[in-house]
Structures are given as C-alpha cells and as structure tokens.
Image (cartoon, helix red, strand yellow):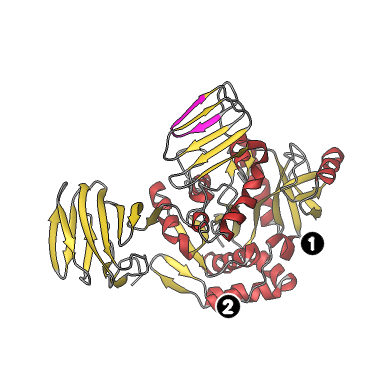
Amino acid sequence: MSDLIVPVILAGGQGTRLWPMSRAARPKQFLPLTGALSLFQQTLQRVAGASQYAPALIMTNAEYRFIVAEQAAELGAPLSGILLEPVARNTAVAIAAAAAFVSARFGADTIMLVLPSDHDVSVDSSYHEAVQHATRAARAGDLVAFGLLPTHAETGFGYIKAQAELGGGASPIERFVEKPDRQRAEQMLAEGGYFWNSGMFMFGAGVFLHEGEILAPETLAAAKAAVSQSTTDLDFVRLDAAAFATAPDISVDYAIFEKTSHAVVVAVNFGWSDLGSWDAVWKTSSKDASSNVSQGKVTLSNVSNSLIVSDHAHIAVEGLDDIAVIATDDAVYVGKLSEAQKVGAMVKVLRAGKDTSGLTEIHRTAYRPWGGYSSVLSGDRFQVKRLFVKPGKKLSLQKHHHRAEHWIVVRGTADVTIDGTMTTLSENQSIYLPLGCAHRLANPGKIELELIEVQTGSYLGEDDIIRIEDEFGRA
C-alpha cells in the first residue's frame, strides 16, 4: 500500500467550443488560455511537488502522446505513465483502465485523484481542505465527487443533490441531475442543496474496481483486458485496441456513481471554470476598465464587455459591445460574446463542408515531437513551409516518392544527411534534396533551428513519407 495519492489526469478530449484556437489536433487542454502555461500544465502543477502525491498518470490518445510528454518535460514533472486510449469510449472505461493500472503498479489500496485536464482551478486553502476531506472519505471506502457551490442557474453542467455543507466533509449523494433546462436550474438554485458536478473524483483503486465488477461488468472487463494486453512504446503504454473497443461508450457518472451506494460529495467553493466556451474564458480572465479581455496584438476603441484574442494578425475593433473576436493564422470567429455557446454549432457546419472540414481538425502550424512546421504558401506543384526543430532533436530518416525539397537555414545550425553523407549548414546556407533520396534533418545546436522548406513535385501530401528509421517509434 502506498500512502501517496496517484493523480490521474484525463487529457484525451477534443473540445471544439473554443474554436478556432482549439481543434482536434491540438485541443484546449494543451493551449495557454489563462496564462503562460497550458491548462494541462496547470493541472500537472497542482499535483506536482507536493508531499502527498505520486507522479501523475496521464490518460490520453495516441495523437496527443508527444504533446503530453513535451509539456510535462517543460515543467520537469515526472510521470507514473502515459496510457494511450486506442478509441474514444468516454470516461468510464478510461478511469477503469487507470484504476487497473494503478492497482497493479501501486497496490489496490492506492487512492486516485481523477482530474480533467482542461479546467481552470484556483488553488487556495479551501481547495487543500477539500482534498483532505476527500482523502479521508476515500480511505474509508467511499467514492468521492467534488461538488461546486453553484453561483448561477447553469444549464451546461450536471448537478449533484446532497445535504452537504462547505467545509463539512463528505456527505452521501442523494441523486445526480443531468443538465437541466433554465427553469429547472433556477428551481434547484432557489431550493438549495444542489452542487455542480465538477468532474473531479477521488477513490481507492481497488474500491472502484470492485464496484465496477458489480455495476459495470462489461466496462471493467474491457478495461482490465486492455491493460493486461497492453504494449509499451517508448515512454507510452498502448492499451489493447480490440479489448478497449468492446467497452460501452458511457460516462463514469452513469456507469458507477449513479448506481453505487458508496458515492459521497465534498462541497467546495474554490475558483473553478470548465472553460467550455469563450464567455467562460472572458469571465475568468482579468479585464480592463471597460470589461474587455484581450490577448495578442489587439487595439480597441470604444469597445466594452468583449473578448478579443489573436495569435497572429493585429486585430482592431471599433465601437462594439458584447463581441467575441478569435483570430488564428487561418481562421477568424466573430460573434456575440453572450452567445458563445453557439460556436459548437458553427463547428458542426464547418466540419460538414468539404472545403472547411480541415479548419476543425488541424492548425496551420502542426506540432511534432521534434518541433513542428507551419504552412506558408502552396500552389500547383509547389509548397513552402517553415520548419522548427528543438535543440538536440532530429527528424526520421525518410524519403519521398513524389517530391524534391530545398532547405534554407534561417536560424541555428542544421546537420543534413543525404544518402549517408552528412553536411552541416549554418544560417543563410541551403541544400537540395533530390526526389527519392534518403535524408534526415537534425539540430545539433543549443538554440531552435529554423528553416524554410520548398517542396516541388507531382504530389505534396504528408502521407508521401517513407520512414526508414525514427527515434520516436514511427518507422
């Protein structure tokens, strides 16, 4: 038995309500929405370095594995593991798989603190007090949910009914209430005794597995099989795809918490937001004298109660109230801030369009474990990209069947290998890579390497890559 709590951070979601910043390839948990660190990194920080926590266990999907590893490394945060979900199956099987892994690694009596990776949480004395209450209840065999004291009649959250008091420890849960309509939410707020379901949980790994065997046997069987048949890939654990896919697509609330007789809630009132929409980002951010929130290159004149965010272009706004302008290098969203929940519907329209579906999936800048690249210009039989390679990193040894490439070093030093011969290039030097050659790019320096890549050929798709050797296990 370990006295340490194992944090389990759920980082596999593909939120789209913060489009165009958040997209499937790099969703909101990996974006710095409320400060210099991403929401995932802020979650890691909450459980790093404290004496009561073991290194965090991360549950994510294969597409995000290198982002997770990179952002944890940036903080210097050790991890107990990175579990890769092969398919999306909601939170019940994900948490069950984490519980099976924790039980095998640390022991069945180990306490797990399950945290979403995309919430904004204020850590204060009430937060630490709530964790202490939850820990005592979990060690006594309860399954603990953290219930937030509601501040308004919110229709986007689930609710928990309980006779609980702030600072009063854990109380039995009477029932869960799904996302209510406006009238029902107002009634519950007036009645009292209802709390927002934060999605944060704490329980013993063995207790959760026992309840799962009784209440959700299909989910638990799939999770156990996925863990026992998992494979190790570099620093990642790939859960078995066939076993994991047999699990029902169901949340942990439905599968376990609404059925168990051991569910309790700890009532809390620390600062919290699920940052589920742009108006939520506005509410949690510091504002100017006119109640505006701006990020990036922004100029405002006679603007109030608005959110203006740009990661590329300079945005100038004149004479507007209650406006949201979110600009990336390839898309701009403009709408009423008070109706920011409608972004999700807009994303569905974009995803359905042949010419716009890509805007919901990827950014113009793509991130890779070695760095990344940005699209600069494309045309008939040519494409221009900006490559950036981290110090000490190298791309796979690869070749292309349909394109040749020219590389021009803008900053840093590049080691370029072509058919076994290596050439070192410095700033303002260039090299030609003929079609079909086996080539590799590496950054031997201590600063980021930046290049301009010009591709020419009959086909320029990213799938025209034959990887011969790769240190990230992609060959």
Picture disc at residue 261: 1
Residue at image mark 2: 243
Q: Quadrant of residue 194?
A: top right
Picture residue at 53% right of the left edge, 58% below the top? 357
Which amino acid type is marked by label 1? Ser
* Membership of 235 in magenta stretch: no
Q: Secondary structure at mark 1?
A: loop
- Residue count near mark 2 (Cα–Cα under 10 Å), binned few <14, some 14–19, many ≥20: some
Tell me if 213 is positioned left or right of 230 in this view.
Answer: right
- Estimate the x, y position of residue 188 in percent, counting from the top left: 84, 43
Which amino acid type is marked by label 2? Ala
Mark 1 vs mark 2, CA separation in Å: 28 Å
**Vertical position of residue 340 compared to residue 421: above or below:** above
Q: Quadrant of residue 99?
A: bottom right
- Estimate the x, y position of residue 320 in percent, counting from the top left: 60, 28
**Vertical position of residue 305 compared to residue 183: above or below:** above
> What type of secondary structure mainly makes up the magenta span?
strand
Q: Report the quarter where the C terminus lies.
A: bottom left
Q: Which residues are magenta?
A: 293-300
